[in-house]
Amino acid sequence: MAERTVPSSPQTSSQHPPSQHAVPPQGGTGTEAAARVADVLLLFTGGPEYLGVSTISRKLGISKAVVYRILQSLVSRDVLATTPGVTGYRLGPAAVALGASALRRFDAKTAAAPVLRRLRDETGETTTLSGLVGDERVYLEQFESRAEIKMTVDIGTRFPLHAGSSGKAILAQLPEWRREEILAGDLGALTDRTVTDPATLRQQLDAIGSDGVAVSLGERQSGAGSVAAALVTPDGEVHGAISVCGPEYRFTPEKIDRYRTLVRDATAEIIRNWANGKATGGHRS
């Protein structure tokens, strides 16, 4: 039997619950309510398709009564929906439309596409684009390797920033205060190679920040290797990261050194494309 492509798709985000953002005490009731609605919606971007009141209440630490009111409001606007005979709530047509619109309008996706396609052809490995979402990242685009054995990713799946090259590349470029907030949170292990010690992570992030490139060998997904760099605009805003990824056994020291240069150059080109698109009013769908 022919060997199937490996590694398998990434682990689902249900193994690492969405981060919970505390609302600053000075925030008014309106701010708190908006934050709670946002937190409820973010739960639906990872994990099971259907979520119930009790599950949401437990994950976010808010009362079932408050959760129920939020859910009913979102259902009335088609952001969430229910299915007859199925317990729980799922994303509704309005949420799907919003998501599709966001992906179409994400400037970096358009700017990155030709660069990632060429990078895939140069390396022979899958190339990806991740976007920063809250304190996590999500895959927005991939150009799959043409090799029989390859790595693929799940578009739209969220992952923590402390595990894997794309996450660490992003985390290394965030402001120190934000990085420290993340390192003070849940640093769960996704594999037996995931670094979960904050002190060790700080050392790694300092090195990544200086070099501009992160390397992962089995840290986020067993058997996978990747090299990534963050997408940072000239004003210092971090938007995401790009990566070259594939089976770990193909990521030899020689290839990693080569990919470092290619990925670093690719991010610079994407940022230039992005800036030029904005300056000329080019199509950014």
Image (spheres, helix red, strand yellow):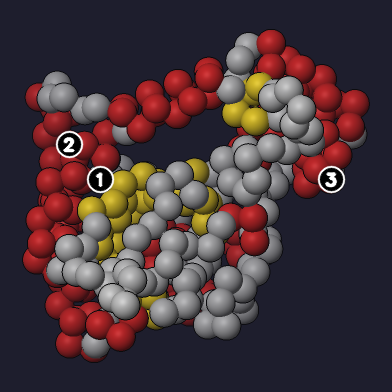
The image quadrant that residue 34 belongs to is: top right
**Direction top: furthest residue:** 76
The image quadrant that residue 123 belongs to is: bottom left
Which numbered disc, 1 or 3, marks the residue closer to the eye? 3
The residue that disc 1 covers is 234
Q: Residue at x 15, y 68 (%)?
A: 124
* Whether residue 278 is situated above or below residue 268 in the rendered picture: above
Which numbered disc, 3 or 2, marks the residue closer to the eye? 3
Q: Earlier in the sequence, mark 3 or mark 2?
A: 3
* x and y percentages locating residue 61 in the rendered image: 84, 43
Indicate which disc residue 66 carries: none
* x and y percentages locating residue 11 in the rendered image: 53, 63
**Direction bottom: furthest residue:** 253
Tell me if mark 2 has few (under 14), some (14-19) or many (20+) residues whose alpha carbon lies within 10 angstroms of its own. Answer: some
Q: Amino acid at mark 2?
A: Ala
* x and y percentages locating residue 274 in the rendered image: 19, 38
Tell me if mark 3 has few (under 14), some (14-19) or many (20+) residues whose alpha carbon lies within 10 angstroms of its own. Answer: few
Distance from label 3 to label 2 (Cα)? 43 Å
Q: Residue at x 20, y 45 (%)?
A: 112
The kind of secondary structure element at disc 2 is helix
The residue that disc 2 covers is 275
Q: Are marks 1 and 2 in contact (CB under 8 Å)?
A: yes
Q: Are marks 1 and 3 in contact (CB under 8 Å)?
A: no
Which numbered disc, 1 or 2, marks the residue closer to the eye? 2
Q: Please name whichever residue, 224 or 37, is drawn nearer the observer in this view of the structure.
A: 224
Q: Earlier in the sequence, mark 1 or mark 2?
A: 1
In the figure, is residue 1 to the left or right of 280?
right
Q: Amino acid at mark 3?
A: Arg
Q: Amino acid at mark 1?
A: Pro
* Whether residue 69 is situated above or below residue 114 in the rendered picture: above
Indicate which disc residue 58 carries: 3
